[in-house]
Image (cartoon, rainbow, N blue to C red):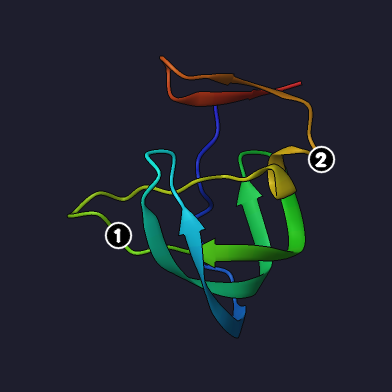
Amino acid sequence: MASMNDSAPNYVPSTGGKATLADGSMVQTAHVVVDHVTVGPKAKRYLNVQIMPRSGNEETGLLGMNFLGDFPHIIEAKAGTIRWQ
């Protein structure tokens, strides 16, 4: 099972941008480079991330292939978990 690490990464501010969501809508983003991202037992350093606006009170995020692509995994959508292989 994966969860975000409680320690917040340091980041280097960068540029703004736009992202297209799955429903076709566009949102403004902030592009930054974080010094580390840890999800369960997996970690990467100096990762490019896009920060999107929150939707209501939800704590949500998207974990992209620039992280997931380096680690064999299975996403168990119904359980809301990532199983690392």
Nearest the eye: 50 or 38: 50
Q: Identity of the amino acid at label 1?
A: Arg
How busy is the neighbourhood of tag 2: few (under 14 within 10 Å), some, or many (20 plus)?
Answer: few
68 to the left or right of 27: right
Residue 58 placed where, x, y %? 24, 49
Which residue is painted at 58% across and 69% down in the image?
Answer: 9
Which residue is painted at 71% across and 47% down in the image?
Answer: 67
39 to the left or right of 19: right
Q: Identity of the amino acid at label 2?
A: Asp
How busy is the neighbourhood of tag 1: few (under 14 within 10 Å), some, or many (20 plus)?
Answer: few
Where is residue 78, by image quadrant? top left
Classify mark 2: helix, strand or loop. loop
Q: Report, in whole angstroms, how far the alpha carbon at label 2 lies from the one at label 1.
A: 27 Å
Which quadrant of the rendered structure holds the N terminus? top right
Which quadrant of the rendered structure holds the C terminus? top right
Closer to the chain start, of discs 2 and 1, is: 1
Residue 51 placed where, x, y %? 48, 65
Which residue is painted at 60% across and 75% down in the image?
Answer: 32
Q: How many numbered markers are drawn?
A: 2
Where is residue 24, by image quadrant? top left
Residue 45 placed where, x, y %? 76, 63
The reply to whether dot 2 and dot 1 touch (C-beta < 8 Å) is: no
Residue 33, labelled with which disc? Answer: none
Nearest the eye: 74 or 16: 16
Which residue does the numbered mark 1 point to in the structure image? 54
Which residue is painted at 78% across and 27% down in the image?
Answer: 72
Nearest the eye: 47 or 26: 26
Which residue does the numbered mark 2 point to in the structure image? 70
